[in-house]
Amino acid sequence: MTSIASKTRERLLDVARQLFASNGVEHTTMHDIAAASDKGRRTIYTYFKNKKEIYDAVIEREADRIVERFAAIADSDLPPVEKLQAYIRQRFQVLDDTVKASTTSQIISYLTLDSRRLERIRRLAVEKEHKLLRKMIDRGVEAGVFDPVQARIFPSIYQVFFQGADYSHLSANYPSIGVDPETFREDVVAFITRTLTNNAPTTSTNSHSTK
C-alpha cells in the first residue's frame, strides 16, 4: 500500500471511529463516513467492502495501539528486571489513560459504556500482548534472571490478575475491598518482581511513579 493510500485508509478509520462514538455503530452508514471524511463512496469501497469491515479494522487498530506501548518497553535495552517493572507500570498507565480519555471525549460511548465493543478490543489486545509478554519473560529466563518455573505460568496469571484490576479501577471499588490505590501499584510491581526473580530488589518507586 502506497503512502497516500495508507493515509487515506487511516483517515477513513479515524472518521469512522469518531462517528461510531458519537452516533453508534448501528446508526452510522458508509455514506456518513464518506461525507465526514470528504471522500466519495467509491473511495471508501476501494478500501473496505462494508461497514463491518471498517468496524473490525477500527477494533484491530485500537488493540494494536494499546500493545504498541508495551512493545516499546519489551523491545528496549533495559535489563530484564527493570524492563518487567516498567512493563507493569505501563499496564496501569494504559488503564489510567483509557479512563481519562473516556471522561473527556465522546469516545466514552465507544470504549467504556459499550461493553461488547470494549470486550472485543480487550480480547484482541490480550492475544497480542500475551505473545509479547511471553517473549519478554523468556528472554529473562535465558539471561538467568527469571525463575523458569514461575515464568512459565506468569503470563496467564498476569492476564487474569489485570482483568480484576481493570474492573476495580473502572468501578473505583478499591476502598470496599480494603485496597489503598496509592500504594497498590508499587505493591504489585514489588510482588511480581520477587515472584519471578527470587526476591530480587525492585527499582526506586519515586522515579517510576505513573501517578
Image (tube, helix red, strand yellow):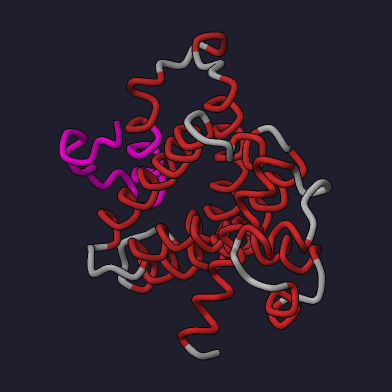
Would residue 194 be found to the left or right of residue 168 on screen? left
Q: Position of residue 158 (x, y in %)?
A: 54, 47
Residue toward you, 75 or 145: 75
Q: Position of residue 129 (x, y in %)?
A: 54, 60
State which quadrant residue 94 falls in.
Answer: top left
Q: Is residue 197 magenta?
A: yes
Q: Which residue of the protein is positioned furthest toward the bottom in this rendering? A: 2
State which quadrant residue 38 falls in.
Answer: bottom right
State which quadrant residue 49 falls in.
Answer: bottom right
Q: Position of residue 134 (x, y in %)?
A: 51, 65
Q: Is residue 74 magenta?
A: no
Residue toward you, 192 or 89: 89
Residue toward you, 144 or 26: 26
Q: Position of residue 93 (x, y in %)?
A: 39, 41
Quadrant where the image shows the N terminus:
bottom right
- Give the residues in magenta: 188-211
Q: Which residue is painted at 43% across and 35% down in the image?
A: 96
Task: Please tell me whether residue 107 is drawn above or below residue 61 in the rendered image.
Answer: above
Q: Which residue is painted at 34% across and 20% down in the image?
A: 182
Would residue 90 be found to the left or right of residue 157 on screen? left
Q: Which residue is painted at 77% across and 43% down in the image?
A: 116
Q: Which residue is painted at 68% across and 65% down in the image?
A: 34
Would residue 175 be found to the left or right of residue 111 on screen? left
Residue toward you, 108 or 149: 108
Task: Please tell me whether residue 154 is drawn above or below residue 58 in the rendered image.
Answer: above
Quadrant where the image shows the C terminus:
top left
Would residue 110 be found to the left or right of residue 27 on screen? left
Counting labels gives 0
